[in-house]
Amino acid sequence: MKPIIEVLLIILDFYWFVIMVSVVLSWLINFNVINSRNEVVRAIWRISYDLTEPAYRVIRRVIPPLGGIDFSPFILLLVVYLLQRYLTGYVLPFVP
């Protein structure tokens, strides 16, 4: 059971990284720092979009963008953080 929880924690760490890449990449594209027509940028954007957009969509149904600001990445990061804290603080210590 303990290895399964540790794998879940690794997956959550990876997902945290993907969310951060998605946020930074969206800023860079929106401020015209990088060109979204570049093949590498487009590939990274597509992967990060495909991995994060389903979760963002669920959050946006509950909390729509307010004043043009989308809080779904922040809320998703908070959810990932709370899941990590729950697994490390309450589940992992009691698993044999």
Image (cartoon, grey):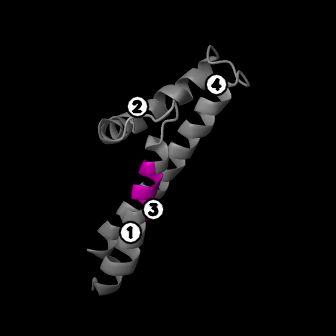
Q: CA distance from mark 1 to mark 2?
A: 24 Å
Q: Residues within 10 Å of mark 4 (few under 14, many from 20)?
A: some
Residue contact between numbered discs 3 and 1, judged by CB atoms under 8 Å:
no
Q: Quadrant of residue 5?
A: bottom left
The residue identified by callout 3 is: 81
Q: Position of residue 47 (x, y in %)?
A: 47, 31
Q: Which numbered mark, 3 or 1, is in the foreground of this view?
A: 3
Q: What secondary structure is found at the residue carrying circle 2?
A: helix
Q: Is residue 22 covered in magenta?
A: no
Q: Amino acid at mark 4?
A: Ile
Q: CA distance from mark 4 to mark 2?
A: 17 Å
Q: Earlier in the sequence, mark 2 or mark 3?
A: 2
Q: Amino acid at mark 2?
A: Asp
Asked if one can make out residue 15 in the rendered structure from this viewpoint, the answer is: no
Q: Quadrant of the C terminus?
A: bottom left
Horizontal side, residue 63 vs residue 96: left or right: right
Q: Which numbered mark, 1 or 2, is in the foreground of this view?
A: 2
Q: Is residue 93 above or below residue 2?
A: below
Provide the residue span drawn in magenta: 75-81
Q: What secondary structure is found at the residue carrying circle 4?
A: helix
Q: What secondary structure is found at the residue carrying circle 3?
A: helix
Q: CA distance from mark 3 to mark 1?
A: 15 Å
Q: CA distance from mark 3 to mark 4?
A: 26 Å
In front: 65, or 13? 65
**Picture disc at residue 50:** 2
Q: Residue at x 33, y 79 (%)?
A: 90
Q: Amino acid at mark 3?
A: Tyr
Q: Position of residue 17 (x, y in %)?
A: 54, 49
Q: Is residue 77 covered in magenta?
A: yes
In front: 67, or 72? 67
